[in-house]
């Protein structure tokens, strides 16, 4: 499978615990995005990387959220001190930007449930 | 801030009916436009995209969309839907060379056999 992969697919945690999700993008894609999606809504942009550099973060992203892409390949999204409001599907997407346009390819997501 | 609206929350059609899902965006500059589909239990998949050129864009599975700049719209169409088209459809916009993608809230399509 050469698509975007995410692990774990499901995570159940207790409020206050830290969680970390991983995203492996399509090989050679230089951009990697994180989104959050709640039921009945479209994906909301959280942050994105161009290679290893984190270039933008949404104002929605509190300081409990941190993302890394240390070698410009896979990325991790960590949520510290989880809250029930963090329960959502966390989506990763990658793209190869060559010039005009940027087409994102999405992974299956990690569903987080905070009890 | 840029926003994307999708007119219908839930559309119910019978097989062979024609489909049109509305999408409007707020940004006035150069935009790239996308329709994604999410089948039950599956991840988001790209249906079609518009960057420039012919405003009538053809995608996979018989879908097409028309970019009307004067109306800030990018409506999705299919002449004859199938039961297998039952899914959630999301319109998305990003500005020119920008990286900030904004998604609409989605339209759930139910096709009755």
Image (cartoon, rainbow, N blue to C red):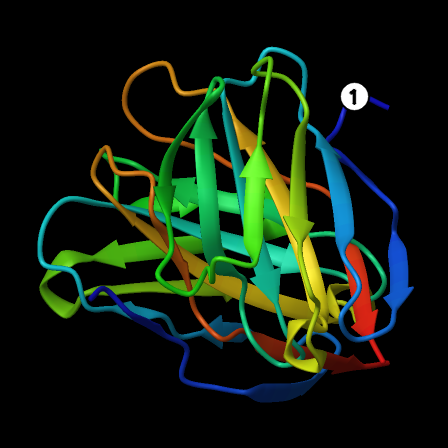
Residue at x 64% of width, y 80% of height: A85
Give the quadrant of residue B89. Answer: bottom right
Residue at x 59% of width, y 19% of height: A70
Q: Quick check: A30 left or right of B37?
A: left
Is B89 placed above or below A20 here? Answer: below
Q: Identify the element where label 1 is drawn.
A: loop
Within 10 Å of disc 1 (Cα), the crowding (few <14, some 14-19, many 20+) is few
Near-viewer residue (B38 or B11): B38
* Image location of residue A2, percent across then percent down: 78, 21
Q: Quick check: A83 left or right of A115?
A: left
Is B59 placed above or below B75 here? Answer: above
Q: Is residue A98 visible?
A: yes
Give the quadrant of residue A114. Answer: bottom right
Is A85 placed above or below A101 here? Answer: below
Q: Quick check: A112 left or right of A47?
A: right
Residue at x 86% of width, y 73% of height: A14
Q: Which residue is mark 1?
A: A2
* Image location of residue A97, percent across then percent down: 40, 20
Chain on which label 1 sits: A
Residue at x 33% of width, y 47% of height: B100
Is A24 placed above or below B39 here? Answer: above
Q: Is residue A109 visible?
A: no
Quadrant of the drawing holding the C terminus of chain B: bottom right
* Image location of residue A87, percent across then percent down: 72, 73
Q: Quick check: B105 left or right of B52?
A: right
Near-viewer residue (A6 or A95): A6
Give the quadrant of residue A81. Answer: bottom right
């Amino acid at each position: 499978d050469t698509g975007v992969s995410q692990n774990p697919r499901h995570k159940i945690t207790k409020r206050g615990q830290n969680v970390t999700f991983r995203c492996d993008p399509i090989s050679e894609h230089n951009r990697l995005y994180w989104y959050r999606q709640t039921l009945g809504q479209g994906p909301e942009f959280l942050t994105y990387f161009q290679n290893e550099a984190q270039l933008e973060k949404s104002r929605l992203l509190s300081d409990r959220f941190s993302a890394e892409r240390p070698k410009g390949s896979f990325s991790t999204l960590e949520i510290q001190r989880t809250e029930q409001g963090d329960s959502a599907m966390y989506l990763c997407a990658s793209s190869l930007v060559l010039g005009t346009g940027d087409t994102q390819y999405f992974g299956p997501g990690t569903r987080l449930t905070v009890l | 801030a840029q926003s994307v609206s999708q007119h219908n929350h839930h559309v119910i059609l019978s097989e062979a009916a024609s489909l049109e899902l509305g999408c409007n965006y707020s940004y006035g500059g150069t935009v790239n436009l996308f329709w994604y589909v999410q089948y039950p239990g599956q991840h988001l998949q790209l249906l079609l995209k518009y960057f420039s050129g012919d405003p009538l864009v053809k995608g996979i599975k018989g879908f097409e969309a028309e970019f009307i700049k004067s109306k800030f719209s990018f409506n999705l169409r299919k002449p004859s839907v199938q039961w297998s088209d039952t899914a959630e459809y999301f319109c998305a916009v990003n500005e020119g060379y920008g990286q900030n993608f904004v998604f609409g809230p989605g339209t759930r399509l139910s096709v009755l056999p």
